[in-house]
Image: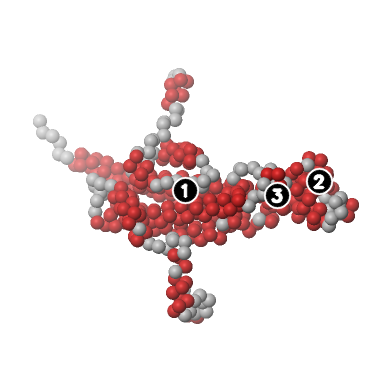
Amino acid sequence: MVSLRQIAANRRNARRSTGPRTPAGVKRAARNALRHGLGIPLARDPLACAEIDRLAAALVGRYLSPARLDQARIAAEAEFELRRVRVCRKALLDWKAAELAAHEPDEDQRSEPLVLDGRYEASALAAALPELQALERYERRAASRRKRAMRWLMYTTATTNG
Amino acid sequence: MQQPDTMNSKLEVMPAPKIPPEIRALLGEPPLLNSEDPSAYEALLATFGAAVRPTDPIEWIHVKDCVDLTWEIQRIRQAKAGIIDVTRKEALRSILESILEEGDLEHGKGRISEADLKADEWYTCPVVREELTALLARYGLDEKAITAQAFALRLRELATLEHMLASAELRRSSMFREIAAYRGLFSCRLRYEIESLDEEVSLAPPSSG
């Protein structure tokens, strides 16, 4: 149990935050997540909405109820969030690998043989580590949301009389 | 006593379940890089499908996630090895910078330039490679020292990759547990239904006549 003294200390320390303080700064920082698109809600994309509805209907199966459909939609939306993160990761790594390949010297200028054995991908992964770590945070959050909703669905599927 | 042929036929691996088209449509595209082999991914999906035999979309989603995480794990492991490989030349250069002596400088250049040149020649000239191997041995070093130096030079990236690898492995284990828990719920329910049926039968009055 956290003591009152610790709570007061935590509040004092939080006021020392180095994040934006002015309204303009806070507003600007709030848009950071939209730069790579992952912060844009899927609900704004009609195509994604249709796919989410289809997946939700499949997850509900024959045991249809408003509560199950709600949870199925949450699980389906989280599933699509996960896919979006993985597509971002793929695009990032393909782009970095292509950049590295484009800067490789010609064969006669190279001192060691160029072996296309995935070393571009390895170097691309190394070069993209900060972005990959950021993507991983999104991935973990979406996976956690999906897990909670799926658990509820799985429990009700297994225990509902058909 | 069973004949070996009969025993062998019982041990034959059951064919992997085909992914129903309606499930395939739900699973989405695999997250493969341009350089990665789609048939290898499909083979992995088939292997997991054969092992788990998913029965509904919920299980299929979990299985696909396990496959994607396994793929990601393999990618990270290969990247770790690849990073060491691409750093070997830099590692050799840095070792040579520290052990080259005045007498070893052939091209009239400084130690750093000479080390750079020799590190290049390690890959192109077998004679130079032999000489450098002998030079390294003078200091009790060999190719393993080059690998170790490569590790040291890329330690931070390798540590980050290790962390990402552990995270992916943890999430994959979590998926396996979720599938097991789901099936456990079904078996609990089945047991409950069977026990309830047993009670009904035992409580039923004996039939007359």
Residue at numbered disc 3 = B88
> Could you tell which of marks 2 and 1 lies nearer the N-terminus?
1
Residue B132: image tag:
2
Badges 3 and 2, same chain: yes
**Chain containing mark 1:** B
Residue A1 image point, x, y percent = 45, 72
Q: Residue at x 34, y 60 (%)?
A: A43
**Residue A151, disc:** none
Chain ID for label 3?
Answer: B
Q: Please give the chain letter of the residue carrying mark 2.
A: B
Towards the viewer: A102 or B116: A102
- Looking at the image, is mark 3 or mark 2 earlier in the sequence? 3
Depth check: give the residue in front, A91 or B169: A91
Q: How many marks?
A: 3
Residue type highlighted by circle 1: Pro
Quadrant into which the N terminus of chain B falls: top left
Of the two numbered discs 3 and 1 on the same chain, state the one appearing first in sequence: 1
In the rendering, which numbered label is found on residue B31?
A: 1
Q: In the rendered structure, which amino acid carries the disc numbered 2?
A: Leu
The residue located at (58%, 49%) in the rendering is A121
- Same subunit, labels 2 and 1: the answer reads yes
Q: Nearer the viewer, residue B91 or B155?
A: B91
Tag 1: Cα neighbours inside 10 Å, few (<14), some, or many (≥20)? many
Q: Residue visible at 23% across and 45% down?
A: A162
Locate residue B35 relative to residue A144 in the image: left or right.
right
Q: Is residue A121 visible?
A: yes
